[in-house]
Image (tube, helix red, strand yellow):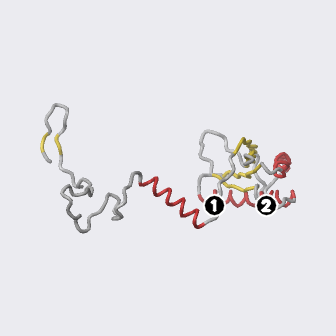
Amino acid sequence: MPGSAPGDNSRPVIKMEEPVPTYVVPDPEGGEPEMGARDPDDKNDALRVVDREQEDHERFLREMDRLFDVKQLRKTKSSLAIDIFNPLVEDEPYLSELHYKAVGQVLPMLYRDNFQVDVVVWATTPSPTAWKRATQQSKVISDRIAIMANLSPENRARLKGVGRPWFDATAERPVLSFVVRKMDDA
């Protein structure tokens, strides 16, 4: 309502353009609801909703489980990152002698069932094209490592190429990282 509110600390009340939300509640006299009445979510589904976001998330997960073969990932016990700051070679497979030395340190882990290795190429700038290029480079590098090591399909599945943007403006950005994870046995 326009006008002044009583008290020294209140400012004048101004009539706003937008109306307050209207909630559909049961008629205390037991009458029929109005035609076209809607609940707060613009869905006339007459469901009691406690947390719409949580319920939408659960519905999404059930739908994904129905459509795809979903299984829980193994938990990580520990992890180690080997960061390399030397630039990649311009031609495929992008690896220099220093990079191959780091690959030699990581390679034995791929023959063990409880280890996973991510080959992370960091994007030069936080832009979609740099991110795409980093992802393509990481795939080429991980494919090269798999061929070099003659990995079985089971072992190859635990070697992943990943391109990531670098968002920290203060920390020095590595060019390539090998992230080794020891997974739970379960």
Q: Residue at x 67, y 55 (%)?
A: 163
Residue 178 image point, x, y percent: 75, 48
Q: Nearer the viewer, residue 86 or 148?
A: 148
Residue wearing tag 2:
143
Kind of residue indicated by mark 1? Val
Q: CA distance from mark 2 to mark 1?
A: 25 Å
Residue identifier under label 1: 70
Relative side of 167 to 59, left or right? right
- How many badges with numbers are in the image? 2
Q: Nearer the viewer, residue 126 or 178?
A: 178
Nearer-N-terminus badge (2/1): 1
Residue at x 22% of width, y 55% of height: 17
The residue drawn where x is 83% and y is 47% is 98
User: Which disc number belongs to residue 140?
Assistant: none
Q: Residues within 10 Å of mark 2 (few under 14, many from 20)?
A: some
Of 63 and 87, nearer the camera is 63
**Nearer to us in this view, 55 or 157:** 55
> Residue 115 appears at what percent x and percent y?
77, 48
Height in image: 92 above or below 115?
below
Q: Is residue 3 left or right of residue 138?
A: left
- Of tags 2 and 1, the one toward the viewer is 1
Vertical position of residue 121 compared to residue 46: above or below: above
Image quarter of residue 91: bottom right
CA neighbours of label 1 inside 10 A, class few (<14), some (14 to 19), many (20+): few
> Which quarter of the figure has residue 31?
bottom left
The answer to which image quadrant residue 143 occupies is bottom right
Q: Residue at x 80, y 51 (%)?
A: 113
Q: Judging from the image, what secondary structure is the residue with disc 2 in?
A: helix
Q: Amino acid at mark 2?
A: Asp
Which percent across, then down, holds residue 185?
Answer: 75, 47
Q: Position of residue 21 (x, y in %)?
A: 26, 54
Secondary element at image label 1:
loop
